[in-house]
Image (spheres, rainbow, N blue to C red):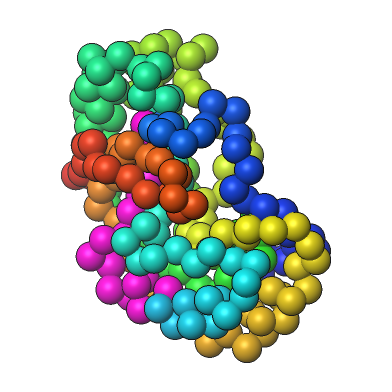
Amino acid sequence: MAVPHATHIRNHWYWRPGWGIGSRFYTWHITFDGQPEVEHLADQYRTLLSQQPSLDVIPNQWLHLTMQGIGFVQDVAPEDVDAIVAATRARCAHLAPFKLTIAAPHVDPESIQIAVDPVEPVRQLRTAIRAAIADVWGSDRVPEPAEPYNPHLSLAYTNTEGPAAPLVEALTSAPNLTANAEIDSCQLIILNRDEGMYVWEPYATVKLES
């Protein structure tokens, strides 16, 4: 089912609580290294989207599907991070790899994004990660609400306020593309946005092995 476009965009890059230059954040993502279909799809859209001054287009190496945050590096003890990784590894060993299909983009208030299908295995993976955090910290200390959660791949972030109509119009000329991705792992990364883009250092990779 097609996702409706937003009617208004806002600047994605405002400083959220706790964030600033130099901030580093532990978070779980699905990343798309080694997924040639996804990179080809993003390449095809990049030419179109890069012509829009209201967008910051995401390079292939930073394509991701946001899963679940843990916390800012200075606030999380290293032994807790490693315990969460171990608990996640144990829980994800019972999950099977899965395939995602990525198709038509839509204008979100803060990004150009593509819903993924099916969503259920992504939700199951996120539930396992949240359960692993609860194993270490207790269920009352799992960060971020469980809902709403809408799995998606972003292609670009908005950098201004204004009507969404120019972006909606641009997408009407977008190619009709579909990409498949084979997901057999998730990554704990150390995220920063010092240079006006989400970039990261890898911390741990957890395999889906069922």
Q: Is residue 12 above or below residue 149?
A: below
Q: Observer-nearest residue: 175 or 138?
A: 175
Q: Quadrant of residue 87?
A: top left
| Residue at (30, 14) in percent of width and height | 77
Is residue 150 something one can see in this rendering? yes
On whether residue 31 falls in the magenta region, the answer is yes
Q: Is residue 56 left or right of residue 29?
A: right
| Residue at (53, 87) in percent of width and height | 175
| Residue at (74, 76) in percent of width and height | 166
Estimate the x, y position of residue 23 in percent, counting from the top left. Answer: 43, 32
Q: Observer-nearest residue: 156 or 87?
A: 156
Number of marks in picture: 0
| Residue at (57, 59) in percent of width and height | 157
Q: Is residue 187 above or below residue 65?
A: above
On whether residue 101 falls in the magenta region, the answer is no
- Quarter holding the C terminus is top left
Estimate the x, y position of residue 55 in percent, counting from the top left. Answer: 59, 66
Estimate the x, y position of residue 63 in percent, counting from the top left. Answer: 39, 59
Is residue 115 something one can see in this rendering? no
- Quarter holding the N terminus is bottom right
Q: Is residue 151 above or below residue 128?
A: below
Estimate the x, y position of residue 120 in percent, counting from the top left. Answer: 47, 49
Q: Is residue 68 left or right of residue 108?
A: left
Q: Observer-nearest residue: 137 or 107?
A: 107
Q: Which residues are magenta?
A: 26-42
